[in-house]
Image (tube, rainbow, N blue to C red):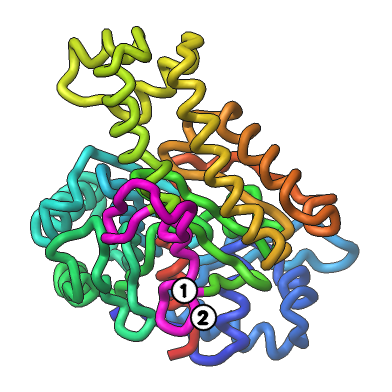
Amino acid sequence: MTARPENPHQARILRLLRQDGARSRAELGEVARLSPSKLALELDRLTKLNLLESGGLAASRGGRRSGIVRIASHLRFVGIDIGATSIDVGVTNGELEVLGHLSKPADVRDGPEAVLEQALDLVGKLRTGETTEIHGVGIGVPGPVSFLDRTPVSPPIMPGWDRFPVRETLSREFGCPVLVDNDVNIMALGELHAGLARAVGDFLLVKIGTGVGCGIVVDGEIYRGVTGSAGDIGHIRVSDDGPLCTCGNTGCLEAYFGGAALARDAQAAAEAGESPFLAERLAHEETLTAEDVAAAAASGDAAAVRMIREGGRHVGMVLASLVSFFNPGLVIIGGGVAGLGHALLAEIRSVVYQRSLPLATGNLPIVLSELGDTAGIIGATRLISDHVFSVE
């Protein structure tokens, strides 16, 4: 059974050490605003709970040298990031440093049993030769997750996952706490912990992968809405007579842009003879992907460049409304399709800066994620460590 802090002071100490790493007792007392005697009491209890350990002595600040404390080195958290077409798994220590990371292609439409089995196999490979206990597992899935019972609810691209007990299934396997969230939310948590948003309390993380979603962070916390469906911007309607979306409606942002929409449009351009580059790729491959569009655009292919610009324009139109409404301090663009890079980013920026009020965009950075495919892993372990490092 994973130990938990006994009171809010201990929980705060653990979260401070998780974020900033080892600290001297003197520094920790100042930040945690605890008297030396109270701090010593709480650190002693956390050490007995095997959640903290000594790290030697700090440099002298004048007088006796203060002892260094850090999160116990044996703690291990697992992050599982399930996407529509891939699985990423990582193991971190208590400070959420990624100690191992594996990924593989996967199809979420194969159903929860098959996909979770593949995830467990990756975790098993990461644990080879390591006998340490897993103290918590965080998992992200590419669909709506109920905030009430942490189960996927009618996810459009995840047949067979509706109300599937993901948390209970993995908890039985690992014998530790498990939490489930939407994949975009865990990416936002990853950016909050280790990415470009570390010093930003209010920001948006827009994931452009097979679909499109948005993580909303308010005052350093994920905003999920009443039931957990906040941020599902991929199903905001862009046009009344647009293409059919996986949700059953027409004209959604996701139907216009994202990995699946790009693959569809690339196929059409290749077959219509509009893109020699994509036509040649299609002659050697069964299907085309967003990566093929990126390669085509890099070679100067006009049709591919047009697809990226049109997609960026649609994302920018939706994002401009969100910026005017929410007034964030930062917008981060992540996900596989964000690999299209600065051509996509430039179009999104252009539309947002043009359509939103100057007061909202005057000091608004819109940037590409620097965490790549580790954002979800770090965020998933942040999610579960928030739980483990809280009072029961």
- Which span is picked out in magenta? 224-250
At 24% across and 73% down in the image, what residue appears?
167
Question: What amino acid does circle 1 point to?
Answer: Leu
**Up-down relation of residue 72 to residue 268 (above or below):** below
Under circle 1, the secondary element is: loop
> Does 353 sit left or right of 234 as displayed?
right
Which numbered tag is attached to residue 46? Answer: 2
Residue 267 in view of the camera: yes
Q: Where's residue 289, x and y in %?
A: 30, 29
Task: Using the image as rendered, state which of residue 12 and residue 330 is in the foreground.
Answer: 330
Q: Where's residue 315, x and y in %?
A: 54, 46
Under circle 2, the secondary element is: helix
At 34% across and 39% down in the image, what residue appears?
261
At 78% across and 52% down in the image, what residue appears?
361
* Residue located beneath label 1 in the image: 51
Task: Using the image as rendered, state which of residue 353 and residue 201 is in the foreground.
Answer: 353
